[in-house]
Amino acid sequence: MDAKTDADVVVIGAGPAGLMLAAELRLGGASVVVAERLARPTGQSRGLGFTARALETFDQRGLVPRFAGLETSPMGHFGGVQFDYTVLRDAHFGARGIPQSRTEAVLEDRARELGADIRRGWEFQALEQDEDGVTVTLLSPDGERRLRAAYLVGADGGHSAVRRAGGFDFPGTPATRGMYLADVSGVAIRPRPLGERLEGGMVMAAPLAEGVDRIIVCEHGTPPADRSETPEFAEVAAAWQRLTGEDISGGSADWVSSFTDATRQVTEYRRGRVLLVGDAAHIHLPAGGQGLSIGVQDAANLGWKLAAAVRGRAPASLLDSYHAERHPVGAALLSNTVAQGTVFLGGPESQPLRDLFAELIGIDAVKRHLAGRVSHLDVRYRIGTPDAHPLVGRRLPPRGLRTAAGEVRSPELLHAAQGVLLDLADAPAVREATAGWKDRVVTVTGTPLEADAFGGAAAVLVRPDGYVAWAGSDAETLRAALSRWFGAPETV
């Protein structure tokens, strides 16, 4: 790190995406300061779980045991139409019932353990970038401060101040409806875990703990409010009674929030030395619990690349691949959440569409497609040639290997966030090809416990984020892939 800088990277926002990014940067050897305007976590949890791919991402870093008692749900829905996600191998609807506050606590503990400098009560004010770095102005508990870093990352949510200050274009569609969310205590509410469509709108209810229920209220004809203040519980209770006829006003709310169906995505995830992750880059209707999960995956994609850049190990094109890979994923997310909102929240005019969806979901191929889309297990980056092995660009599937040291699961090989070469055919030429990258890529020779676990590939090169960069047996193309993703080889 340059002596004139305070950190290699400054991250604005200590939500799941920002904290995951901080940990990834530290694993990659970059120093990081995380600035969060809140003096302490709120304890509030809009999200109550994460998708199958986010769970795999946590598994790759050894974090799953920290979510004690974690359970996954095979049954999920698309636009309120229920089906079994395990029709697709490795898929499920996600880890359910995990408050976002718990996920953030796990990620913050991990980031701090790795040496991330997390500063609460520090609010972003402005940025100035030049060819060599970014100067960030923040309001700290002790007054205005300026930090200098090689890069700045906005992980500060849907109302991102970094996005505005960085001049990012944020096109999309404005909100058409407003909705309420609240955790209600002291009143009996009938569970409606998948939502219930009523004449005047939709309500959802699910028990969180003894005597506490999470409710969502979407009333037809409710315009999206331009809110600067949190809505009162009385407002939520009145809407609930109009829709259901049930009086919950005698209870109380642990917290209340509102949201809309606004759908927007930045046109570029990187502008020079300023980058965006998570909701700072894309906002959407929270359908299927995908928002937190996509943000975590944005961070996993960016972290190792940004760390390689500040350490001088990144090929020139590496940081550009962040936008190239994650922007299409964000666009697909917006598309599927808009579709779900149209089916699920629409009035009587949407009933034919709901009926059609119910018919289509009876087809296994449709189930597999939708399960892959919502679980994010269908993501494939365009990083190979047209004739590349089918694994290239996809996540490394979680499979077992028998090695000289014993049996191991493939996600365990990624705990250190290094590149991994799986030598599955005991090929000396393939192992020798990695000689110049031994400081960045670990070679593991082993036999898959399942005959076709890795698509029959003789060897597989895996990036630190768990995606396959190359698969085959040819040493020359392997060296090209190593140079593309891990920089120039060391010279002896």
Image (cartoon, rainbow, N blue to C red):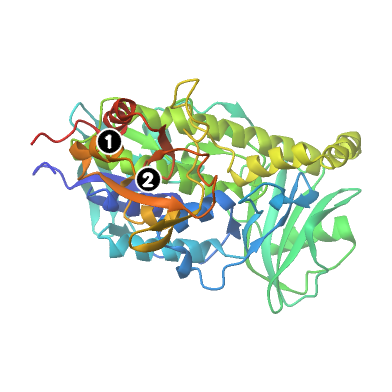
User: Front-most of 458 and 357?
Assistant: 458
> Is 319 on the left or on the right of 293, as rendered?
left
Residue at figure coordinates x 49%, y 42% from the top left: 395
Circle 1: element type: helix
Placement of the N terminus among the 4 image quadrants: top left
Placement of the C terminus among the 4 image quadrants: top left
Give the Cα distance between marks 1 and 2: 13 Å
Residue 334: image quadrant is top right
- Can residue 350 be seen in this snapshot? yes
Q: Where is residue 83 shown, x and y percent of the image?
A: 78, 50
> Is 99 on the left or on the right of 305, as rendered?
right
Residue 411: image quadrant is bottom left
Residue 413: image quadrant is bottom left
Residue type, mark 2 in image = Leu
User: Front-most of 367 and 158?
Assistant: 367
Q: Where is residue 208 shown, x and y percent of the image?
A: 67, 70
**In the image, which is nearer the foreground, mark 1 or mark 2?**
1
Residue at figure coordinates x 76%, y 37% from the top left: 366
Residue at the spot of label 1:
429
Q: Where is residue 246 shown, x and y percent of the image?
A: 87, 66
Nearest to N terminus: mark 1 or mark 2: 2
Residue at the spot of label 2:
422
User: Front-most of 291 and 171?
Assistant: 291
